[in-house]
Image: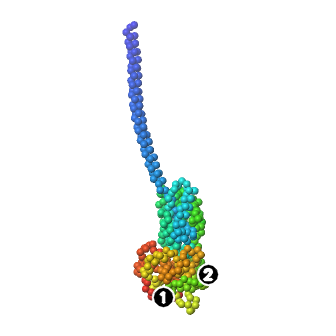
Amino acid sequence: MDSTSYLDRYRSLSTVDQQKNQLIEELLKRVTELENSFQQEKLDHERETRFNRDIQLHEMELMQQIHQIKSIMDREPFVIILLDGEGIIFKDEFLQQGEEGGRNAAKQLSIALNTYLTTNLSNINVPKLLTKIYMNVRVFGEMCTRSGIVADPSGIHDFIRGFNETMSFSEIVDIGSAKNTVLDKMKETLQVFLYNCHCHQIFLGCPSNTEYTNFLEDILKEGDLTGRISLVEGVTFEKELETVKNSYRIAKFPEIFRSSKLAPTWAPAWKTTHTLPSRSLLTPSPSRQFSNPPPLSRTSTNTSFSGAGAPLTAATPNEVSGSPDDFQVVRPKAESSSAPAKSVERNKYGQRVDRLDFKSIPRDELNRLKKLKLCNYYFLLGECPNEENCYHDHDRKLTRQELHILSAIARMTPCRFGLECDDPECIYGHRCPQSEPGKKTCFRGDSCRFEPVAHGIDTNIVKVTKV
């Protein structure tokens, strides 16, 4: 074998050896790449493991916080009842019983609501009941008097007192005489509780009118909120609420609230004439203004009667003021020329002046007589227009001094005709008894039952109007 063949063989082996080395290098390079990839994957896995662990811990913390928040949200659950007191009216038997009626109304309303919640909203677990009723108490008292429900507006104040004293979260709020005040308070109060997580349901009681309809339509725009509101129906809903009532849950409590509107039972004198039963004996009076009264005409919240059962006659146009729906007892002019003329004392501005010194009346006696619940109509005018259903006392024997104090108590209730009243036998007040001449307010401030014009009246009598 020559050297050339050996050289060829060597070169062949060298080529194989180079290929082998190249393969080894490639394998080593690939191993290095895989090791790097593995290390990266390992790091990523460890990172994801830590992240998942952190997420799980954070999720557990969030779930714990959610549980705590839910637990806080579930604390002190309550349901609120918002009522327009002049549209949703308690039944007559409650209003007529004064303080006791107020207490019974609050208890019966609480029982009825709990029964309704158990039946219709069982998911609400033993909530507290908040009741807010807004009304103009003075106007409402006069409405009830005109409708024959109570003999005196003060009976409504007694009812409210009993209602407010019974339950910790039940109250009837006197909002005064400003226009739309009830609507404004209802809207603002509802907005506060509508988004309150502790408030599980709102019972809204309102009359059928355009203002409330527009407000309820605005709430409908937020569809998730309608389930939080139930409409309380007393008087059957009228056409104004037809468009929205089907979108809300309707709750009725016929054993608590009236199903009919208040209607004056003292009809206007120009529409009807009544005859009252005669009474042989009339209660004696401390002064001339409480003597046996002559025949009367009916036109408002105050009533007086003839002692001989004579029919009530129509008042003349000059004796009637206000709208046809405003009624007040007005004494007609004497029919007989021999009858003594009655008179109304006025100051230099033509304003009526009640000749009564309230400061001279003992406060203790005044409060004592108030608690006796005496019927002003019976003792001061001789007859009660609602005697069969009147819850006020008719049987007590009063002294002259007690009659005088009772007349002062009656003067604490404002007369609807105010300073222009020309009924000489009117038992109601024409100026604020707590106001001093020249001062346009009294210690009661805005809560006074008398209008601002009835304050600071000049009590110097300069002229007398004979009737």
Residue 71 shows up from this direction: yes
Pointer 1: what residue?
464
Position of residue 89 measured from the top left corner of the image (x, y, whole percent): 55, 68
Residue 438: % across, % down? 40, 80
Measured in 3D between alpha carbons, the distance from the residue under mark 2 to the one under mark 1, in whole angstroms, is: 34 Å
Residue plotted at (56% across, 83% down): 282
Q: Please give left or right for residue 149 compared with residue 173 in the image.
A: right
Residue 461 % position (x, y): 45, 86
Which quadrant is the N terminus positioned in? top left
Residue type pointed to by label 1:
Val
7 shown above or below 150: above
- For discs 2 and 1, the disc positioned in front in the rendered view: 2
Residue at 54% from the left image edge and 59% from the top image edge: 114
Answer with the quarter of the image where residue 251 lies: bottom right
Q: At 41% from the left edge and 22% from the top edge, which residue is drawn?
A: 23
Which residue carries the number 2 mark? Answer: 277
Numbered label tally: 2
| Badge 1 element | strand
**Residue 61: quarter of image:** top left
Q: Amino acid at mark 2?
A: Pro
Is 8 in front, or is 122? 122
Rendered image quadrant of residue 31: top left
